Image (cartoon, rainbow, N blue to C red):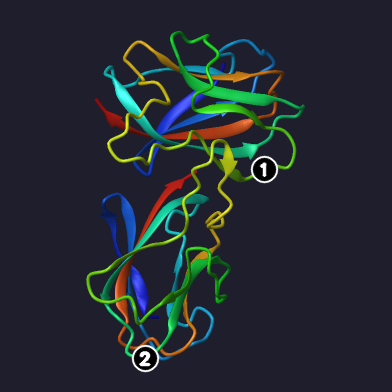
């Protein structure tokens, strides 16, 4: 497990600390369980890079069941381009009037946010900020 | 009329249940809980259970508890395959130095009202409002 909850209080966001790893398996960088034990709606996601991946790799993050890869928060973000001090918007926020928020998927109590590299992401480090509301 | 208020994720959460009446504010007419003007920055509606029959819902800031207003959500269908779905409410103002013209400011004397255009019996939903005090 190379991800963990750093703080639940940064600007009202859940803050997840990510450290890259050699694994390129689905959820190989770790996964975070729903911390509320009830359905949550993710409204905004932001990634802040501390250091980039040493080798070429992409990072995918999303909501899914345990042990699977998902991409509905970050879809194959260039982990080398995520250099120190850069911010990355996550998913596209839904801003259409009375329009379903279809992505990211609803974060049900049994779901996880999973982190997956497509190659070794050693050297990568950053924070994912997740703004959500609990139903 | 039936609603309860709570907070979640820094938002005001208003839980509502559907009613038979289709008059203005029949589902709920929620007074401003802060006693001061607030701007509604973002709105999200989560439908736990849809209405039994076909109905659309209006949500907005109205002059009275029985005013039918639609500047948060206008005529959203709340019947059918909508269980467990979340909806964005109003279009957020994302333009630089642009007046946030809608929804209307929620003053200390106005209400956020919920109105169906037909019976909304069966509906269980929660409106989340992110606000900023004036």
Residue B122 screen position, x and y as percent: 69, 28
Residue B106 screen position, x and y as percent: 36, 20
Residues at marks 1 and 2 on the same chain: no
Disc 1 secondary structure class: loop
**Residue tagged by mark 1?**
B83
Q: Residue at (48%, 74%) from the top-left corner? A: A60
Give the numbered dot on residue B1: none
Q: Residue at (56%, 57%) from the top-left corner? A: A105
Observer-side mark, 1 or 2, equals: 2
Considering every residue shown, the one lying at the far right of the view is B53
Disc 2 secondary structure class: loop
**Residue tagged by mark 2?**
A55
Q: Residue at (47%, 70%) from the top-left corner? A: A61
Q: How crowded is mark 2: few (under 14 residues within 10 Å), some or many (20 or more)?
A: some
Q: Residue at (55%, 61%) from the top-left corner? A: A110
Q: Is residue A102 left or right of residue B10?
A: right
Q: Quadrant of the C terminus of chain B?
A: top left
């Amino acid at each position: 497990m190379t991800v963990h909850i750093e703080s639940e209080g940064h600007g009202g966001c859940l803050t997840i600390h990510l450290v890259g790893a050699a694994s390129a398996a689905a959820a190989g960088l770790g996964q975070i369980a729903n911390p509320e034990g009830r359905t949550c709606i993710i409204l905004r996601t932001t990634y802040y890079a501390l250091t980039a991946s040493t080798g070429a790799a992409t990072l995918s993050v999303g909501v899914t069941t345990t042990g699977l890869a998902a991409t509905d928060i970050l879809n194959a973000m260039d982990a080398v381009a995520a250099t120190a001090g850069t911010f990355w918007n996550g998913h596209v926020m839904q801003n259409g009037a009375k329009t379903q928020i279809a992505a990211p998927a609803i974060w049900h109590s049994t779901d996880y946010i999973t982190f997956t590299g497509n190659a070794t992401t050693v050297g990568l480090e950053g924070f994912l900020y997740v703004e959500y509301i609990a139903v | 009329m039936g609603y309860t208020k709570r907070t979640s994720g820094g938002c005001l959460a208003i839980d509502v249940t559907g009613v038979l009446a289709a008059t203005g504010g029949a589902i709920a007419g929620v007074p401003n809980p802060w006693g001061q003007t607030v701007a509604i920055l973002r709105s999200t509606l989560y439908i736990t259970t849809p209405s039994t029959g076909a109905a659309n819902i209006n949500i907005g800031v109205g002059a009275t508890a029985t005013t039918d207003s639609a500047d948060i959500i206008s005529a959203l269908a709340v019947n059918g395959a909508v269980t467990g779905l979340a909806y964005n409410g109003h279009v957020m103002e994302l333009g630089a130095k642009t007046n946030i013209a809608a929804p209307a400011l929620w003053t200390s004397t106005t209400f956020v009202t919920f109105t169906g255009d037909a019976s909304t019996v069966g509906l269980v939903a929660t409106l989340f409002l992110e606000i900023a005090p004036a």
